[in-house]
Amino acid sequence: MKRAALLLSAVTFAALGLPAHAAGAVTTTNGCVLSVPDAGSTTPQKICYSLFRPAGADARHRVPLIFHSHGWAGSRTTTASSFDAFTKAGYGVLSFDQRGFGEDGGKARIENPAYEGEDVAKLVDLVSKLSWVQQDGPGDPRIGAIGGSYGGGYQFVGAFTEIAQKHKQVFDALAPEITWWSLKQSLAPQGVAKTEWDVALSGAGANALPPEVLQGLATSAASGTWSDGSIPGTTDLDAFFAKNGPQWQVSQGRHIDVPVLFRQGITDELFPLDQGLKNFAGALTPAARARSIFVGYNGGHVLPNTFPLTVQPSGDPCSEKLTGGGTFQTLTIRFFDHVLKGKKDALKGYGAYHLATSGNTCTTTRSVTPNASYPIGTVATTEVAGAPLGVKVADGPLRVAGTPTLSGTVTALGVNNRAFYALAVGTTPATARIVQGNMLPYSSRLPVNGVATTIELPSVAVDVPAGQSLYVVATGTNDMFAGFGSRTPGAVVIQDAKVALPVVS
């Protein structure tokens, strides 16, 4: 009873918008709201937050509010100084612990609309009652959102939940970084588990994840095959992750119709560039895309990756280019100023993709789909583990930005056949390096013979200089899928192969 009374006191105290303490010119309030119970429980789940009110914000001078949350296994930000750039720009900020982390307890459902979606909705209801927050109507505060990785996931589930419940756009602008379109596509493309990431994520979130999900990720990591419940006694991760991302929301007919500032890591091995590109193309209405900006940078979720030879640069030349020397945070504030405050700004680049090349220059394009095809003959892996094999696609100079594909007729006579593919740049096949680190798999559980197939290659941005060539590289193993190539010896051979490239003129 005493604990319940304390929790109720915190919720009521915060809902009144009264300060817990003041830090300089910014007033900080800590509190919790009550949300839906965890699965199998009847006890409401607390969702705790820190609220930062900028100097001068009151009932006569209302300001927009920025939501923020943490990455996987993290916790909310409780220090006002961390948001100085936003509060000095005249924004309130609410940073919150996501279910399963920080002060919240409970179990993480990984941005499930029925759980984390409801949690965000409760926080929206809270700020809709604050006298100093700008309101667009009853239950409709003026809101932007920031955060990366898991802190990008809450933005989508929150925005889509408000659309589903209120049948209107409540979030007014989003700025998600390095987040996903589909968790299964990210964690197990073609059903092949990214073993290193399965281990890393389940280890970091061991106390927050439901036991059956931990078991499923452990099974995936041990076998190299996504646990889909087809083997008796194993977890059906497909069922658990079915609704946990924009892909499902879009399948339900929902689209976000407000401006979004995307930032996606091109060297990101967990949520690669293609996940951001699919969000830009699929999650937004055409009108919203025209008012949005996409930035790809060299960075994100990156683990050491040594086989095959690869290039893993770091840098964000496009944010610098768009802002005239600033950072992505600079770009975010200018974007929010334009969208949330209606300020006129010379900021350009709306409706376009701005992608960092492997050499850390910035390429701007309106399309990331292939527009040129190159026949390359036969692409094959070795029959057993060995050096990657490269086939020339084209000579430089050449600029590529977007998502290439490899197509042809596939023959693989083993069982559980696997091969991994990427584009590479160099002077010879032996010395060519994988562009921006990523490879994607082809997988077939049964033998195939002459089956027409199209394989999506990792999305990239690269300038191939004169004197060097672009290659497609094939290998039977890759670090991100450690230890899990084909189950039986045998080459994966693609005949009459063609590579389709998004060439930027």
Image (cartoon, grey):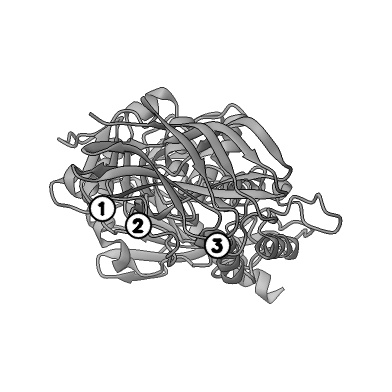
Distance from Cα at disc 1 to Cα at disc 3 = 24 Å
Label 2 Cα neighbours within 10 Å, binned few <14 / some 14-19 / many ≥20? many
State the SS at label 2. loop
Q: Is disc 2 in contact with disc 1, using a CB cutoff of under 8 Å?
A: yes
Nearer to the camera, 5 or 276: 276
The quadrant of the image that shows the C terminus is: top left
Residue 304 in picture, x, y percent from top left: 43, 67
- Residue 348 as seen in the image, left or right of residue 340: left
| Residue located beneath label 3 in the image | 197
The quadrant of the image that shows the N terminus is: bottom right
Can you see residue 398?
Answer: yes
Three-letter amino acid code at the position of disc 1: Asp
Residue 461: image quadrant is: top left
Residue 242 in picture, x, y percent from top left: 67, 43
For discs 1 and 3, the disc positioned in front in the rendered view: 3
Residue 449: image quadrant is: top right
Residue 293: image quadrant is: top left
Three-letter amino acid code at the position of disc 2: Gly
Three-letter amino acid code at the position of disc 3: Trp
Nearer to the camera, 218 or 319: 218
Q: Earlier in the sequence, mark 2 or mark 1?
A: 2
State the SS at label 3. helix
Name the mark on residue 316: 1
Q: At 68% across and 76% down in the image, what residue appears?
A: 2
Can you see residue 129?
Answer: no
| Residue located beneath label 2 in the image | 299
Distance from Cα at disc 2 to Cα at disc 3 = 16 Å
Q: Earlier in the sequence, mark 2 or mark 3?
A: 3
State the SS at label 1. loop
